[in-house]
Amino acid sequence: MFEDAVRAEASLARIGRLCRRDVSDVLRTMFGDWPRGEDGLSRLERITAVLSSPSVLADQLVEFPELAGLLASVLCSSHHLGDVLIQNPELVFQFFDPQMLDTTVSQDLVIAEGSRLLGSSTSYSHQLDRLRFLKQKYLLILAAQDIGGLKPQPEVWKGISELALALVSLTRIAVWDQLSKRENSELECPIQIAVFGKIGGLELNYSSDIDLVFVAADNLSEPEESLAKKFCEDFRSAVSGRMGRGDLYRIDLRLRPFGKQGALFSRMKAVEAYYEKYAEPWEHMALIRSFIISPGEVADRWEAMRTQIAFRKSRSEMAVDNILKMRRRAEAESEPGDIKRGRGGIRDIEFSVQIAQLLRGSETPELCGRNTLEMLEACEKVGALTNQQAAIYRDSYPFFRKLEHRCQIEGNRQTHSLPDLVELREVIAYSLGYGSVSALEDELAFRRDQVREVYDELFGSMAGRSEQQQYEWLNSLPGGDAFAKVVSENESSAARLALVSAQAPVLLPYLKQSVSVVEQVLSGEVQEQVDPDEKFALLRTHYDRQEMHRAIRNGWLRANLRWIFVAGVDLGPLLGSHMDSAISALAHRWGEGVSVFGLGSYAGNEMSPGSDADILVLVSEDSDRASVERSVQSAAIEISKLRGLGAPFEVDFRLRPEGKSGRMVVTPASLVRYASDRMEPWEKFALGRVRTVFGDPKPIELLYEIVYGTPITDIELESLLNMKSRMERERVKPTQQDRHLKLGHGGLDDINWLLQLWLLRRPEMGGGDAIPVSTNTRLRKLFESGILDAVEHDALLEGHRFLIMARNWLYLLGIGDDVLPENPDRLLLLGNRFGLSDPNDMLALYHGHTRRVRGIFEQSLEELVS
């Protein structure tokens, strides 16, 4: 019976009073045998307390004991679903409706009900709330079917997927309707939505991200293009924005062409070109489980592209080896108990099936499906798996997925491991029919060993390939035979190429697009200093998008490669000069009287390879402001198009007055008015590092006056310190506070904030005419003013250099997004760049710097506020 009998008896008594009858015997039967059954009972008590008719619930509990037991199973298995029922107590009666429990959740069913809810909603936010309610309603039914064993596991996965597809379609309708009204447009929605991964295979988890890509038709008009971009942004907010019922889904858009660097949406012809020319083997594999949700021409072309790319007739051994290497990296980065990415887990089965599809799909139509279990059957049928191999995979896959679901449903967390708490493991084991946690863990270990044995049988022989094969991609370039010959005959050329492959694999997809830069790498010319303005000179007067794309891509590549090859070169100024030239090429077309100012790390020439450039655009009072405004808006769209082509070119205009809602171009007078009336302290802070990029440098004096004309007050300082504290809490996960290179404790932001706050508090330190923007110069100013002593100055200077270098290497190695890896192999990769051979030494080096930086930061802040 109950582990905490006193707590359980108190809940039984309170429920009886709420229901006005004694139902304690029924409740003891429902909850008494469950591990921590009193937790489930407590959740039922909270539901009963908010019901308008608790006596009706009592009648149902007594009359339908089996269905009451199903309700208890859900409440004991998931505190999250308990919270959902507390928020929507009327949904508890679904558990006593056999017809509802037998419902097959389909897109048609959900869309029909969702359309009615959208039609009766009173506002846009109300519509988004109704969609979240719809998800809660049907997830409760699916959870009951899952936990109660009312439906087979594949039907549960399909139901979760169909629900998500329907809600994506309904959100698309709601967002476009709202956007059309706001923009006074009668156009139809130009964006189609492609799904990938688990949702594409109709095997979604309870707590999965949904992988989406936005696609448009080729003949998109200019008005449609502008609306399309707004739609994508609004859609993302509508789905992932947190409301009273939480988010609808977490969205992952990284599978779009060129990943995070790419535009939010692409025309279909651009998608086709990307997959034909640039996509990596793993992207070909990801296409297998993909489709466009809505039928039509774009969906038909997507399916044709999927068939052509994913199931092409020949595929090199190198391509398969790249996929297997990716699998090994994912396994190395996973936690020991990870049943998705770890050894012998879900990914082993899915990769086995999908590689068979890649290799045999062109000749075997049966292997061109999307669902893992269906393709397992097909693999066995065509001989890609033996009967025994297929049986092991077929039995283990539903076991793993069911266990994964139980782990996720408990707290609505995207987890793939058994929880650390023994009590929660006991609940999961009991819900799956095991008498003890050890019995479940033994079964899990046995199945993982079996699955890994099959995986090794299939792919073990592909290990140990020749290193020379990593350069096979050269053959696909124009003149590739000559390049391959150079590599085979010239040791220095081969060494440079090997250096890029080992130390900057992120650059390889860009390098494969640029024959000229490959030539410079092989010849060594890439090590020479060049004037970036020369590459953009013609574009200032004769603009061409394709040429601009090439100039941006190649200049960015050369900057990164020169930093890798040439000792003592600072990457920040190289990237800054390249960005100056690219922005100036665009700004030349904006009209008379335009000045462009770089802000933040861009102003300080301290960008990393993945940084965006924050800019502010000013126009003189006697210029045609409206014309310049239109030109800059067009430039923002052009930048998106360049990113869509794959250009690593991110420019951020949001630090202008009024942010995203304000004009993109401001005059000096309007900026002064805004500064005197409404400018917040953080906006002053953001303008604190500024330099001229293009045009007349004279307005920078105005910016100096706005920011540094008078010292910030105590209230403004307190506001900024509160903001810094809030950023640390909200933008950094607690587990990453000591590992985030930029926002974490002792990170780059600690140094930048410390310097900027002192300059705002004591602007006379800046030197008047030219406020320092580089960290080195600012540190020198604080040292000369006596704020920092020599030891503190040197510690911050060395810490800044270390963090910048570590941030650059994390990006180029492709092993982290400003976060120090926990995985020892990744730490070792990073450590090698600092001459270290032990991951623990890398960890110690990092913490040595960040703890010194944090200590100085905290001590200096105390002096600042005193």
Image (cartoon, helix red, strand yellow):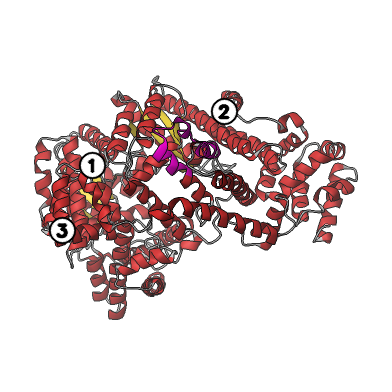
Residue at the spot 77% in from the left edge and 39% down from the top edge: 51
The front one of 565 and 678 is 565
The residue identified by callout 1 is 667
- Please tell me how crowded label 3 is: few (under 14), some (14-19), or many (20+) other residues with Cα within 10 Å: many
**Residue 279 place in picture, x, y as percent:** 32, 41
Residue at the spot 47% in from the left edge and 46% down from the top edge: 352
**Residue 69 place in picture, x, y as percent:** 79, 44
Amino acid type of the residue that numbered disc 3 sits on in the rendered structure: Ser
Local secondary structure at mark 2: helix
Whole-angstrom CA distance, mark 2 to mark 1, is: 52 Å
The residue identified by callout 3 is 493
User: CB under 8 Å between callouts 2 and 3?
Assistant: no
Whether residue 700 is visible, yes or no, is no
* Quarter in which the N terminus is drawn: bottom right
Residue at the spot 29% in from the left edge and 57% down from the top edge: 466
Which numbered mark, 3 or 1, is in the foreground of this view?
Answer: 3
Per the image, is 361 magenta?
A: yes
Mark positioned earlier in the residue sequence (2 or 1):
2
Which span is picked out in magenta? 353-381
Amino acid type of the residue that numbered disc 2 sits on in the rendered structure: Gln
Vertical order, 185 against 823 (above or below): above
**Residue 27 place in picture, x, y as percent:** 84, 48
Please tell me how many numbered marks the rendered image carries.
3
- Please tell me how crowded label 2 is: few (under 14), some (14-19), or many (20+) other residues with Cα within 10 Å: some
- Please tell me how crowded label 1 is: few (under 14), some (14-19), or many (20+) other residues with Cα within 10 Å: some
Mark positioned earlier in the residue sequence (3 or 1):
3
Amino acid type of the residue that numbered disc 1 sits on in the rendered structure: Thr
The residue identified by callout 2 is 107
